[in-house]
Amino acid sequence: MKIEVKELSAWYGSHQVLRSVSMGVRENMITAIIGPSGCGKTTLLRCLNRMHELVDGARVEGEVLLDGENIYDPSVDPVEVRRRIGMVFQKPNPFPHMSIFDNVAIGLKLAGVRDKRKLREVVEDCLKKAALWDEVKDKLDQPGGRLSGGQQQRLCIARALATSPEVLLFDEPTSALDPISAMRIENLMLSLKREYTIVIVTHNIQQAARVSDYTAFLYRGVLVEYGETAVMFKTPRHKLTEEYLTGRFG
Amino acid sequence: MRLRKLADRAFTLACFASVLLVLAPLFSIVYTVASRGARALSIDFITSLPAPVGEAGGGVANAIQGTVMLTLLSMGITLPIGVASGIYLAEYGRSRLADLVAVARDTLAGTPSIVAGVFSYMLIVSRWGFSALAGAVALSVLVIPVVSKATEEALKMVPREVKEAGLALGLRRWKVVAYILLKEAKAGILAGALLSMARVAGETAPLLFTSFGNQGYAGGFLDPCSALPLVIYVYATSPYEEWHTQAWGAALLLMLAVLSINLAVRRVVRG
Ligand SMILES: Nc1ncnc2c1ncn2[C@@H]1O[C@H](COP(=O)(O)OP(=O)(O)OP(=O)(O)O)[C@@H](O)[C@H]1O
Ligand SMILES: [Mg+2]
């Protein structure tokens, strides 16, 4: 297990959003989190790299083990955790006034990488992986905020790849994309699997079926069912899961 | 139906009239200063020192030097303090101390400029005498709140998602603030800085008993120095016709300086 979530509960103020969730994320696999809107998918994802606590009044109980070490241990530096676990947000959030190039390179630059050639290589490589290179290679010095929504999201993916984290968290990465770009992102995730461990939140059940190895079904903050995607989609154990997968609510 | 149209017309007309009401005095000031000041303007006026009373000619080179010195010096004091306090209040401002700083700053923002002069007089002049530095301190007291507020507001305008993106990259908070948020907020901060520069260049009252004035060039920051607003004040209230002309000339110079700063602000804000 790359990540082990143990009895994780999360709150915004007094509003409990996750209720004792326990699940494991296997290394070099894609794990999908599905469930109706507002069930806590984003919150669960943000608990995995200690982004949840950045919200005022937000609180977490329970453990998240990364390579066996609890990331919520007081001795752990959250910055270090976030360096190892990259994230792509639900809403595209490039640095709007920063150039496309710097948007991708900033993580490395601020980590002390000075070598211009190396930076160029990484930027090109990551933009290619994110299926954006062809569209921006002639305007790398333009601000990231001037791209279209879908292009911005792919820029954010390239940015997350650039610092080469061990785990990548994707929060509905394709919801702002056209079907072709979405397909390319799905293929990208499949190819990234070799190097990274991936967790993806998605509203799109077909997408979960296509890309993920394991699926977690979350309902009102409770982990209803968790298991191999192929098995779960064919023979869901829980009635709620079956109803959700067959589109009877959600 | 016709009545409604009429009301619409009347309203438009009223708006237009009030625009004229605002613009008329402005244009009349600009016109008067420009036409009267132009007569005084010459290379000599800009490059030479004042002539003794009664003699023709002479210029305001010392005042130009003084205004440049005062502006640079006060910006040197204001920008670090203003920007740093703005960052503190925007990014780390959730403590008692921060509330106190914010209240103090907002109170300071309402300080009459003469009081800023008194403050600097007591702090510096009473010990070390009149100097450009004393003038710059007085001016800084006036505009530190402006820069601080501009910085705070500009940083708060940066979407929360952008900050989270930086943190999610595993960057330390100070790096996110220094290299990402400040960059996003640059236009707002720069606009605040330029506006306070324009204000500093035009202030008279706090200089009267701090930088005091100087008939010649100031030898350094610890010498008394002249300034364009001071020259305008002294010359305009003098009984000499020659000096009145020079006051208009100095006013024109100052107006041009402030105008160009304001144009710069518009450019910066438009980005
Ligand atoms: N910043 C916040 N402050 C307070 N409550 C929040 C905040 N963010 C989310 N919530 C609440 O937490 C619950 C779970 O939200 P979350 O964003 O995790 O849902 P989600 O499953 O990602 O939904 P969606 O599919 O619509 O993105 C919701 O009831 C939401 O109202
Ligand atoms: Mg969500």
Image (cartoon, rainbow, N blue to C red):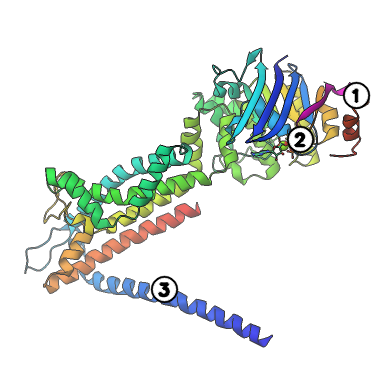
- Find numbered disc 3 in the image and state the secondary structure of the residue it sits on: helix
Residue marked by disc 2:
A39
The answer to whether tags 2 and 3 share a subunit is no
Look at 6% across and 66% down and name the residue there.
B53
Q: Nearer the viewer, mark 1 or mark 3?
A: 1
Quick check: can you spot residue A130?
Answer: no
Look at 93% across and 25% down and name the residue there.
A234
* Quadrant where ligand 2 appears: top right
B107 lies above or below A44: below
Which quarter of the rendered picture does the C terminus of chain A lie within?
A: top right
Look at 66% across and 16% down and name the residue there.
A65
Residue marked by disc 1:
A237
Left or right: where B134 falls relative to B7: left
Instruction: Provide the residue span drawn in magenta.
Output: A221-232
The answer to whether tags 1 and 3 share a subunit is no
Instruction: Count all numbered tags in the image, as a single digit.
Output: 3
Label 1 chain ID: A
Q: Earlier in the sequence, mark 1 or mark 2?
A: 2
